[in-house]
């Protein structure tokens, strides 16, 4: 489970800042390409990944009768995705058939999950965007997933929007998109993200008051470094 401290840090951080922190560690491909929030006014989505993998549907194995199976991977994921986790679909970047719809996503919300992501599409998108539940997709889609997608497994490594996702990686979404943080470096990245967020807020305040970015952003000027350090000391003693 994710600690309250980590949740607080990532709930306040932008995906852009997190991407830069990951880039500093040599990770360049952690942003899920092509997805956006249905409701951009919600707070950050923060949760560990629980995954579903789709493959191309084969008609003789993927008719409507498959939903009679209580262990059908899509249905299983909806009922077993842990509280505070993000359900994330590998839909092969194909939104021509829906990864899920409003009933399944409402079930995730009621169960206390943190959000849902697909690199395909959701049906009932107008209903989903009115839920107080973070949901990210490529574009709306009405046909049932069965027409193109065959749910094959849950909670395994997947690809989503050209990013690799392992179970229990940290998923963070804001109004621009979604980023994946490898589980093994969540703590390490949180320290960098926290420091960057504090500094970026400091810089924005100075720039709004007329300061130049030269030597300030990035921080290369010694006098600016001293000014920031003094500001930090004052802030920490408040």
Image (cartoon, rainbow, N blue to C red):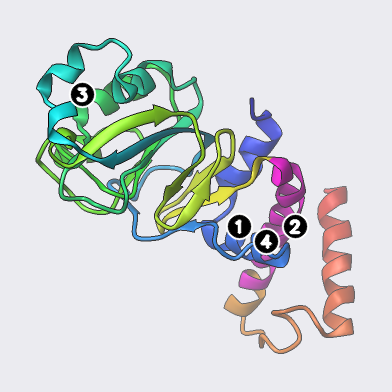
Report, in whole angstroms, how far the alpha carbon at label 2 lies from the one at label 1.
11 Å
Q: Say if mark 2 contacts mark 4, CB within 8 Å.
A: no
Q: What is the x, y in percent for residue 128? A: 22, 36
Residue at x 59%, y 40% (from the top left corner): 169
Which residue occupies the foreground of this view, 159 or 195?
159
| 117 drawn magenta | no
Mark 2, mark 4: which one is toward the viewer? 4
Report, in whole angstroms, how far the alpha carbon at label 1 lies from the one at label 4.
5 Å
Q: Which residue is mark 4?
A: 21
Q: Could you say whether the residue bearing mark 1 is in a helix, strand or loop? A: helix
The majority secondary structure of the magenta stretch comes to helix
In the image, the segment drawn in magenta is: 184-204
Report, in whole angstroms, how far the alpha carbon at label 4 lies from the one at label 3.
36 Å
Residue at x 71%, y 66% (from the top left corner): 24
Crowding near pointer 1: few (<14 within 10 Å), some, many (20+)?
Answer: many
Q: Quadrant of the N terminus?
A: top right
Q: Which residue is mark 2?
A: 195
Q: Is residue 1 left or right of residue 31?
A: right
Q: Say if mark 1 contacts mark 4, CB within 8 Å.
A: yes
Residue at x 48%, y 54% (from the top left corner): 163
């Amino acid at each position: 489970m994710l600690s309250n401290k980590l949740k607080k840090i990532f709930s306040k951080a932008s995906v852009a800042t997190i991407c830069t922190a990951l880039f500093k560690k040599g990770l360049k491909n952690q942003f899920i390409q092509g997805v956006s929030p249905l409701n951009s006014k919600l707070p950050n989505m923060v949760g560990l990944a629980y995954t579903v993998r789709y493959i191309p549907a084969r008609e003789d194995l993927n008719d409507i009768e498959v939903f009679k199976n209580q262990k059908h991977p899509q249905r299983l994921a909806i009922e077993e995705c842990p509280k505070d986790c993000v359900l994330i679909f590998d839909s092969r970047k194909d939104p021509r058939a829906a990864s899920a719809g409003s009933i399944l996503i409402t079930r995730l919300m009621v169960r206390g999950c943190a959000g849902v992501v697909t690199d395909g599409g959701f049906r009932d998108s107008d209903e989903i965007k009115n839920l107080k539940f973070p949901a990210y997709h490529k574009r709306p889609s009405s046909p049932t997933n069965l027409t193109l997608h065959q749910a094959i497994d849950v909670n395994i490594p997947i690809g989503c929007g050209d990013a690799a996702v392992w179970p229990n990686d940290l998923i963070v979404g804001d109004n621009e998109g979604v980023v994946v943080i490898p589980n093994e470096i969540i703590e390490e990245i949180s320290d960098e993200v926290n420091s960057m967020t504090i500094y970026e807020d400091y810089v924005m305040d100075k720039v709004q008051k007329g300061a130049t970015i030269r030597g300030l952003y990035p921080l290369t000027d010694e006098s600016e470094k001293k000014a920031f350090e003094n500001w930090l000391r004052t802030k920490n003693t408040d």
